[in-house]
Amino acid sequence: MKTLNEAFCTPSMRRRYEVWFLRLGLADGSGAWWFRYLLMNPGRGGCPGNPQGMPVQVWASWFPHGEKPQSFIQGFAWEGLQVSGKGQSPFHFQIADNAIDKNSCRGALAVEGHSISWDLQYRSTFRVTLSAKGWIGFSRTPHSDAVFSGHITLDDRRFEGNPLGYGLQGHNCGYRHRNFWTWTHAYFVRTGAAPSTLEALVYEMPFGLVFRKAVLWHDGTEYVFRNLQDIRRGREPFGWSFRCSAGSGLSVDVMVDGAGSSAHRLPYLKTNCSGRFEVINNSLSKATLRLERPSAPVEVLETSAGAVLEMAG
């Protein structure tokens, strides 16, 4: 069975990135983790001559509540990679002691005097393809309402639990990064009911077009919106507010607040190796969603740290 994680890259591709990632907010509220398993330009060995341009990379970012985030990135040679073939299932990816498959991942990094390791399992009830543009690229979410268990260690600190946290596992790929994008995923824990999730993506396309889509998973139903209207989208303060509607009078208003000490600025390499650009990510964002449906009371979903907001360009 296809899981939306199946690899697209082949060893001969000279210009392409592909990434499998996880965002989990810890159940105890102490922070959030962001893990990335990245392939970059396999056919040319990444960006040769750039120490940050290794063709295989593993990233771990820690977002402690009320403190400044930390990122740990380790690069590897392509020759050490074991990855399933293009489109093949079951999917697997392994480099040294770092691995990910359809419902688990692990890692072990030693970066600048720090030791980070993790061993996680995850399950979910909803998956979605947010964007699919063929060879140009795609954005998939194999686990949209993920529940994580296992453990993570950072030096002498250990995080462990069942559940350990909540969030998503995603899979993106592209010939190049878009000139601009804004993306969010919010996980709403609900007392006495299944969790709801909201994922939204906006990015530039050729010929001046803009891709816009949001998907709400709520009470076992998928709601797809393609008419996002920005209310506010900006870096200072970091946040995104928008509204969108579907047929039969259904509408949502969303506000994601990514301001504060958890906003993390990271340099990404361009796939043509011509330089870097900045990506802002806050994996401890706040989110509020107001859902209106005909003949039903207005529902308000809120999370104080269960959302991620990312913006580039």
Image (spheres, rainbow, N blue to C red):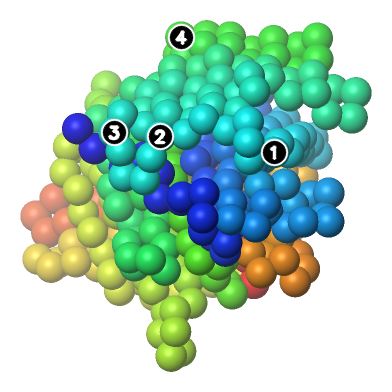
Q: Position of residue 214 (x, y in %)?
A: 33, 60
* Chain-order first, disc 1 or disc 4: 1
Which numbered disc covers residue 162? Answer: 4
- The residue lying at 31 percent from left, 29 percent from top is 90
Task: Name the residue tied to disc 3.
Answer: 89
Whether tag 3 and tag 1 are in contact, CB under 8 A, the answer is no
Amino acid type, residue under disc 2 in the picture: Ser
Q: CA distance from mark 2 to mark 1?
A: 17 Å
Q: Position of residue 307 (x, y in %)?
A: 51, 43
Task: Name the residue tied to disc 1.
Answer: 77
Q: CA distance from mark 3 to mark 4?
A: 28 Å
- The residue lying at 76 percent from left, 12 percent from top is 157
Amino acid type, residue under disc 3 in the picture: Ser
* Chain-order first, disc 2 or disc 1: 1
Which residue is at the front of the view, 31 or 21?
21
Task: Name the residue tied to disc 2.
Answer: 84
- The residue lying at 69 percent from left, 10 percent from top is 158
